[in-house]
Structures are given as structure tokens and as C-alpha cells.
Image: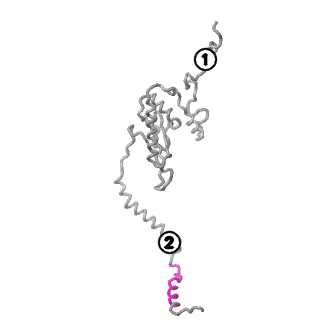
Amino acid sequence: MRKKISKASKADDEEILQHFQPDGGLDVPVAGYLLHRQQRQTLYYMRLIEHEIPKLVAFRKPFVPPTAATPLVIRSVDFAGEQHPLTAKRIVVVPVAHLPLRNEVAFHRAKLLAGVRWMPEPPRDSGISADEDAAKHGFIKIACEDFPRANMNLKWISDTLDKLVLEANAEGEAPYQRLPLDTRHLDSKARKSKKGDHVRGRGGLRPSLKDFPTEWLPKRQENVISSILPSQ
């Protein structure tokens, strides 16, 4: 059976429909509400700038440049609090001239031990100026992201630097002491940058025979001939 609609319910529906009648253009469209919300957000941040930002002056600290007692420059990556595997990575840049090395031989050993991690100029993202006194012996850059936590990666870098300094200061003449520095990684970097420094050794002096140990060089021709021919 079809249900009959009472007059009371019909009157209630008509009363409700009165609130949904066209307002004659007095209300704003959806785009207007979006604009108002954007303006409220802008006003909220303007109030923060006006009333909260001046309170940060209490946390201001003067800049103190690093000294020889604190030669390490530690760099990290942060994504504004978001979880990311790269946030555990730590990068350390240290001037070789600021390491506790005993003499020039130890400086040369440290460069050889650092290998491709040694560079004559500071990295662009290290925050160290190239015209400082620290650039005398170049820089060593070590990065680590093998461990899940940042302090573990930083501890590994610190231990590696300690071992490098200890080995460079070791007593006795090591066989690699007279070896020239291997700059092939710098040449490869210059070739990849394609700025012209890779053309015929333009970026630095080309190696010659004087750069190799005397034990590696071939003997003179007269010495070879005299050793082959019987003496008369």
C-alpha cells in the first residue's frame, strides 16, 4: 500500500525548503571561500612573524670561526623532520694542515693514505674558504652512510681519521714515502666537468720521470751494454 503523506510532514518540508531558496546572488561561490581560506592562512603567518619571530633573538649566538683545535667540519642532511635514509649520512671535511701530524713526511703520508678522498681545494659544500691557511696541504673528505644511525656513521669516520693520523705519524721510512701523489681522481673529475681543464694536462703539471722513484726507472743504456758485453 502506498503510504499517505500527512499534511504536517508536508508543511515541515516546505519550511526546510525555504532555507534553500536562491539568495539572489548574495552568497559567494566556492572559489570565494577558497580565497578567504588562503587569506586567513596568510594572516595567521603574518601574526607569527609579527609576534613570535622577535622572540628568537634570545637564542642568537655570535659566529665563532673554527680554529686549529676544532678542524672538523661535519655536514648532515635533513628533510624537515621527515624520515629518509639519507638523514643518517654524515660527511666530514678536515684540512690536512690542521691534523696533528709531526712533519712534512707525515703530511705526505696522510695524503697518500687518503687516496681519492684527498683534494687540493675544499669541496664547495664544505663551508671552508679556499684562501685560508688551511689550504696549504689540501683537504680530506670522508662520508659514511653504512650504519642506521647518524652517531654510528660519525663514530666510524672519527675512528678512520684517528687510524690515518696514527699511520701517518708512524716512525720509520715506509716504501711509499717517496711515491708521488696519485691525482687521477682529480683528472677524472676535471674531464667530467668539461670546463677545459682536462685538455693536455691544462689543470696542472704533467708527470715526468722525476716524479717516479729511482728504483722504478730503467737503467741507463751504457750500464745495460756494459753488463751484457764481456769485459776486455
- Residue at the spot of label 2: 33
At which x and y percent is residue 53?
38, 58
* Quadrant showing the C terminus: top right
* First in sequence: mark 1 vs mark 2: 2
Residue 190 disc label: none
Total label count? 2
At which x and y percent is residue 103?
43, 28
Instruction: Find the magenta span and give its range.
Output: 10-26
Judge whether 52 appears above or below 194 on screen: below
Label 2 residue SS: helix
At which x and y percent is residue 129?
45, 40
Give the amino acid type for the residue marked by disc 2 in the picture. Answer: Tyr
Q: Residue furthest left?
A: 58
In the image, residue 171 lies in the stretch drawn in magenta: no
- Front residue of 41 and 148: 148
Disc 1 to disc 2, C-alpha distance: 91 Å
- Front residue of 218 and 211: 218
- Residue at position x 56%, y 22% in the image: 215
Mark 2 Cα within 10 Å, few/some/many (few <14, many 20+)? few
- Front residue of 56 and 177: 177
Label 1 residue SS: loop
